[in-house]
Image (cartoon, helix red, strand yellow):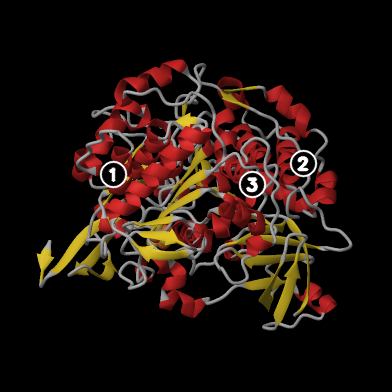
Amino acid sequence: VRRSGVEKTETTCGYCAVGCRFEVHAKDDDFLAVQPTDPDHAPVNDFSTCVKGKFGYEFVDQETRLQTPLVKEDGEFREATWEEALSRVASEFAGIRDDHGPDALATFASSKGTNEEAYLVQKFARQVLGSKNIDNCARLCHSSTVAALKQTVGFGAMSNRINEDIGETDCYLITGSNTTESHPVLATRIKQNVRDGADLFVFDPRKVEIAEHATQYSRTRPGYDVAWINGMIRHIIDEGLHDEAFVEERTKNFEDLREKVEPFTPEEVERLTDVPPEELTRAAETIANADTCVFGWAMGMTQHSHGTQNVLALANLALVTGHVGKPGAGFSPFRGQNNVQGGGGDMGTLPNNLPGYQDVTDPEVLDRFAEVWGERPPGEVGLRVPEAFSEALAGNVHGMYVVGENPALSEPDLSHAREALEDLDFLVVQDIFMTETAEYADVVLPAATFAEKNGTFTNTERRVQLVGKAMDAPGEALPDWVIVQELANRLGFDWDYDSPADVMDEINDLVPIYGGISHDRLEAVGDGLQWPCRDADDPGTPFLYEEEFNFEDGLARFVPADMGEPGELPSEEYPLTLTSGRVLYHWHTGTLTRRVEGLMHHVGESFVEIHPETAERLGIEDGEPVLVESKRGEITVDARVTDRPGVGVVFIPMHFAAGAVNTLTRESFDAVSGIPEYKVASVRARPA
Ligand code: SF4
């Protein structure tokens, strides 16, 4: 639509996985504003966006955007033509592959790009490089969710809808989610529903904003979540409050569960977690007696060395109470990045799954991909992100292709991650800004933002929505899908996709859960399609598991969760427990939001939250600089003295390069999913 030279383009938010829709108003490639769009095309946010969605897009047309390819020479970057940069990348990758084999290369895909781009990035890694090593940032956020839900119910995804289920349930258990600051529009739905009478139970070591609205807030000890969840299950079974018919007809392994939770008496739970027995039993009874309940969680549950066990425990609780597979109920892992569900999972940027969560070792699946691609993908499980960094340090991974990710700030124990980046023979970073990671690169390729390309994102409720191109990218920057295609062709392939819609056609062929999702159809329906959507007549699946779980026998499995301790416990030397997370005004490693003046005005630098009792004991004053140290390193940040964290617990946000919290965190990983334990590390603090 053109009026007064202002072009209005409907699109999907590029920040978080709530997936709000709006119009971008642009003129002469200037990003002017975000405005509401047709409410029928905005299924999640017919009322509003959050502060980031409304005011956080100043970064799009900034002068500091990468506008030409850069190559490093004698330690300095210089501008290069696309021809030179791409030829260099192609020849270096080919050289590493010839000298050390394809698995000496690793690709780190983005959850910020479109589905079509993620699909092509994994295809590039597997078909063009011939490497099994492809992973993405979901490894660092919800990989433990995916691992647990695949075992118990079959799909590693949210089972329900945001508005009709989360927005209208009778009861919530929210744990390990700072919902108000991380998923603001979704939190607004929850708070509206609580005002209308729904019960809200929040279990969290930190008194996050949504806890202010709770029926009951229970402070937990970081790293002991299996105990209180198993304790709830035990109490529910003991009181005969479980949903016997559901358990009988739709699940198996109930007796194993009953046995596993037996030791978790309310008194034992209190000993392990500090949650008083009356709080535990009240929450358990209310959840069990509710007609419907939603179980919402995020990284406070997943980012632990036993993150998969935490999510298994939650899944067991939802199943034992029968709150799955019906309107108003279900599993709600709140996904983070705008397209982490699609780009970080559905599209197979995973070392163990081809697109559509198809097993990379299944010969039939490999045959099917070989038929369409012309080459058979490597049939082995590849390296996960943290393993790729370890293998780089060990001299086994020589080259890395990082697309739209910032591991130099996001990996745990940054000194190690940065050493690994330095040790690589060849590093390519494709991004929109010169990030902390791009500084280590040999070649930097300038990419387009979400506002400068077409495609699709899949939000946290599995809804695939269109992304619309509102303007051209600055300078010579190009969409990721174009760059990857150019690289593939320089490495001897003959890719000829002429648009993201064309890529989606191939996805339809190879990914059964996306079989009926085309750009034309998305244009026609306006408000997206929720997978599984298997063919052109399939209306999609608003909530999962209404009739059967995603296994051949249709039954959910109770997989009893084991209680484990955090990888690092407080000691005399490091007596405090560090936990980390987000603030409303920033996003992940801050590569976007730290460039937006209005957001920086609200929170412009890192800080440490510390409980008044702890602060007094340590002589720390509110607003004064504090030195926080762990065995890995030290940072200095200003103190915020507040009772949001418990006594002995400190919180530092994850968004800042100065005072980077991951200087302090530890390389301790969940054995099943490989997720790092960002949420627990032992530190000490003193006035700086
Ligand atoms: Fe964007 Fe998420 Fe905010 Fe919606 S809630 S406007 S999707 S950042």
**In percent of the image, x 85 and y 50: which residue is there?**
271
Question: Marks 3 and 1, how far apart in space?
Answer: 30 Å
Viewer-side residue, 242 vs 303: 303
Q: How far across and down, in percent of the image, does residue 41 sit?
A: 26, 52
Question: Dot 2: within a 10 Å radius of its alpha carbon, few (fewer than 14), some, or many (20 or more) residues?
Answer: some
Q: Give the label, 2 or 1, closer to the camera.
A: 1
Residue 542 in view: no
Res 393 label: 3
The three-letter code of the residue at mark 1 reads Glu
Q: Quadrant of residue 371?
A: top left
Q: How far across and down, in percent of the image, does residue 369 sit?
A: 36, 24
Locate the C terminus by quadrant.
bottom right
Decide: is 228 above or below 592: above
Secondary structure at numbered mark 2: loop
Q: How far across and down, in percent of the image, does residue 242 sit?
A: 65, 33
Tell which circle, 3 or 2, labels the residue nearer the N-terminal end: 3
For label 1, the residue is 486
Q: Is residue 636 left or right of residue 13?
A: right
Question: Marks 2 and 1, how far apart in space?
Answer: 47 Å
The three-letter code of the residue at mark 2 reads Gly
Tell which circle, 3 or 1, labels the residue nearer the N-terminal end: 3
For label 2, the residue is 564
Secondary structure at numbered mark 1: helix
Question: Marks 3 and 2, how far apart in space?
Answer: 29 Å
